[in-house]
Image: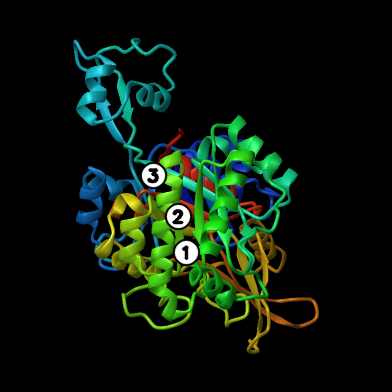
């Protein structure tokens, strides 16, 4: 599967012809609202042989070729307009597939072992009708390995909507987590309607993970967290209530998302997590946490100081890095999940916890800010699909920022108001998947379901094998 960036007034008919792909397949894969309307800078995923790579600063053609096990010349041939001496960060390269000519006495099993793949993958990649039906001299495409990762998705959709979303995405999900059970100062939990969501998860082999938090969109929750963390009796009551809900509703584990914890409560929070693990592990439940995106142990600020990466990595089963929200809805316009920042967070996390405990957080929504930005003015939040539709509607060319590896555009609406939109597309998704592969992380965690983004899910499947339990 490759990523194509629309330029120069290209039509879908021209693009389909270039790749020799059925035009309807492209329409369905990208869920194009109007196939006759494309905009410069828009990305399309094309079900063609090979894969795509988004150039990063410092890349050379030889390092990219070595990474994918092909020659530099093969990449040049696959990208006719490429200047091999001038690689531009953010530019998308087509990486050609590996070809193999069947030799006498070859079997698919032998070929699969040689290339580190599976017979099933060879059959699927080459659309073979029978696994043993190969002949000397016939060409085979060798699929690239797809690392096995775990995939979590938070959702705050209504119960019935969430159930439908889980069912539709179930082959790609390991966990799902309705957001969220709010703690109270008496150790109780505010009720959540999640029965249909949990039932849909179990029906589709997705593990339900109970999210517990201390904050809302209007309450930071710092004092509430302190009330619980400073009182072991309240903690025991809270844990009893958590276990009761988990048993009654069918949750398999917990995600503790305490945010804005007071800096002085850092050790109390660590001790609480130890108590959670001691209570839940004997009953077979797993424990995870969500942590603010830190780049150093001493990073200052209410969001960061009480989140002790080393302790979380040591105590709990896995940790979700909340590597998003740099482009905050009340702040100035910027990339919501800039890859440069995400990389710094991952590198710090890896310095104090193992890769097999780390989930990369990935936001799947867009934001539209008014210009000029006024402090405190709230940006509109919507789906990446809607972002592309706005670019088309206002004929706004989509640009791509090489440093943050994120698409954006500016437009002026009917009333003369200027806007700036940052979102995610196929290129930005691929760079995040490449980051997971580079550091061999445990998985990816989406925030949050309910925003249509078909390119992401198609690329996720093309890059990884989601673990099912």
Residue at position x 65%, y 84% in the image: 371
Residue behind mark 1: 322
Label whose residue precedes the other's in the sequence (2 or 1): 2
- Name the foreground residue: 161 vs 237: 237
Q: Element type at marker 3?
A: strand
Residue at position x 63%, y 65% in the image: 186
- In the rendered view, tell whether residue 10 sits above or below residue 145: below
Residue 238, by quadrant, is: bottom right
Residue behind mark 2: 276
Mark 2 neighbour density, 10 Å: few (under 14) some (14–19) many (20 or more): many
Q: Element type at marker 1?
A: loop
Label whose residue precedes the other's in the sequence (1 or 3): 3
Residue lying furthest front: 233
Image x and y of residue 36, in percent: 69, 50
- Name the foreground residue: 368 vs 77: 368
Q: Is residue 82 left or right of residue 225?
A: left
Q: Nearer the viewer, mark 2 or mark 1?
A: 2
- In the rendered view, tell whether residue 467 sits above or below residue 433: above
Mark 1 neighbour density, 10 Å: few (under 14) some (14–19) many (20 or more): many
Residue behind mark 3: 51
């Amino acid at each position: 599967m490759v990523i194509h960036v629309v330029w120069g007034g290209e039509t879908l008919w021209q693009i389909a012809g270039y790749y020799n792909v059925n035009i309807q397949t492209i329409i369905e894969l990208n869920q194009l609202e109007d196939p006759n309307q494309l905009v410069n800078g828009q990305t399309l995923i094309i079900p063609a042989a090979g894969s795509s790579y988004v150039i990063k600063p410092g890349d050379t053609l030889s390092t990219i070729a070595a990474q994918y096990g092909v020659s530099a010349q093969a990449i040049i041939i696959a990208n006719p307009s490429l200047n091999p001496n001038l690689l531009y960060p953010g530019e998308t390269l087509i990486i050609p597939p590996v070809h193999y000519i069947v030799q006498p006495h070859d079997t698919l099993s032998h070929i699969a072992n040689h290339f580190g793949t599976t017979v099933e993958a060879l059959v699927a990649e080459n659309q073979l009708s029978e696994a043993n039906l190969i002949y000397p001299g016939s060409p085979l495409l060798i699929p690239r390995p797809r690392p096995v990762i775990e995939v979590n998705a938070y959702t705050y959709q209504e119960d019935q909507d969430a159930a439908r979303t889980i069912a539709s995405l179930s082959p790609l999900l390991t966990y799902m987590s309705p957001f969220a059970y709010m703690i109270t100062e008496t150790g109780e939990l505010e009720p959540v309607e999640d029965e249909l969501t949990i039932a849909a998860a179990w029906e589709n082999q997705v593990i339900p993970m109970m999210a517990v938090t201390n904050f809302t969109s209007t309450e930071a929750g710092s004092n509430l967290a302190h009330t619980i963390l400073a009182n072991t009796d309240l903690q025991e009551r809270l844990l009893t209530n958590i276990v009761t809900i988990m048993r009654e509703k069918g949750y398999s584990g917990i995600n503790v998302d305490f945010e804005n914890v007071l800096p002085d409560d850092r050790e109390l929070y660590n001790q609480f997590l130890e108590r959670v693990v001691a209570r839940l592990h004997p009953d077979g439940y797993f424990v995870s946490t969500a942590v603010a995106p830190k780049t150093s142990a001493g990073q200052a600020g209410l969001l960061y100081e009480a989140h002790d990466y080393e302790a979380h990595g040591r105590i709990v089963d896995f940790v979700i890095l909340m590597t998003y929200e740099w482009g905050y809805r009340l702040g100035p316009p910027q990339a919501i999940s800039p890859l440069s920042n995400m990389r710094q967070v991952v590198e710090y996390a890896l310095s104090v916890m193992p890769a097999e405990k780390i989930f990369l957080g990935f936001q799947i929504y867009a934001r539209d800010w008014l210009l000029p930005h006024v402090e405190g003015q709230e940006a509109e939040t919507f789906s990446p699909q809607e972002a592309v539709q706005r670019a088309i509607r206002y004929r706004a060319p989509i640009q791509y920022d090489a440093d943050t590896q994120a698409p954006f555009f500016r437009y002026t609406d009917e009333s003369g108001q200027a806007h700036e939109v940052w979102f995610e597309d196929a290129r930005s998704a691929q760079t995040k998947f490449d980051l997971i592969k580079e550091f061999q992380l445990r998985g990816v965690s989406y925030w949050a379901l309910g925003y249509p983004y078909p390119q992401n899910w198609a690329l996720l499947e093309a890059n990884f094998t989601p673990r099912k339990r």
